[in-house]
Amino acid sequence: MFFLQAQHPWDYLRPLAEFAYRHDYALRPIVLIFSLAMLTLALLAYRKNPTKRFALVALAFLFFSIKWALKVLDLFVSPGYFFSDASENVFELIILACLLLALFKH
């Protein structure tokens, strides 16, 4: 069995981070496809039961899909890195706010 020698607690995550970095070209489109599938399911749920709660969940998955579409475009189309961490954090804040509001809506 393979054991890692870790000097810091986060050293155990390094193999996972290296795997993700090596397979980034495949993983980003896969996550985009899953996010679009979840958006489709959320929109179908909203269409069946048009409540504010389902609208907020669908909106969260819309922003999630947009975020990953931009990340895929950034990987394959852009010559640089136009979708910065700060921009991604704004998307994630909106997603979390939508999901939080959906949890507490009556």
Image: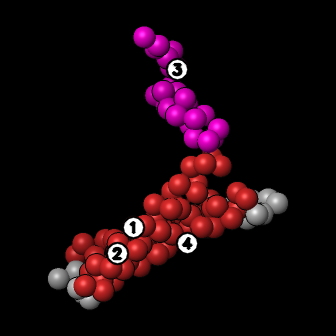
**Residue 41 occupies quadrant:** bottom left
At horizontal 62% and vertical 42% (from top left) the residue drawn is 23
Q: Residues within 10 Å of mark 3 (few under 14, many from 20)?
A: few
Mark 1: secondary structure: helix
Q: Residue furthest top?
A: 1
Which residue has dot 4 on it? 66
**Residue 18 occupies quadrant:** top right
Which residue has dot 1 on it? 38
* Amino acid residing under circle 2: Ala
| Disc nearest the viewer among 1 and 3 | 1
Q: Residue furthest left?
A: 106
| Residue 43 coordinates in the image, percent (x, y) | 36, 80
Q: Residues within 10 Å of mark 4 (few under 14, many from 20)?
A: some
The circle drawn on residue 7 is: 3
Of the two numbered discs 4 and 2 on the same chain, state the one appearing first in sequence.
Answer: 2
Query: Is 34 rendered above or below residue 52?
Result: above
Query: Which image quarter holds the C terminus?
Result: bottom left
Mark 3: secondary structure: loop
Whether residue 82 can be seen here: yes
**Alpha carbon distance from label 4 to label 1:** 12 Å
Which stretch appears magenta?
1-23
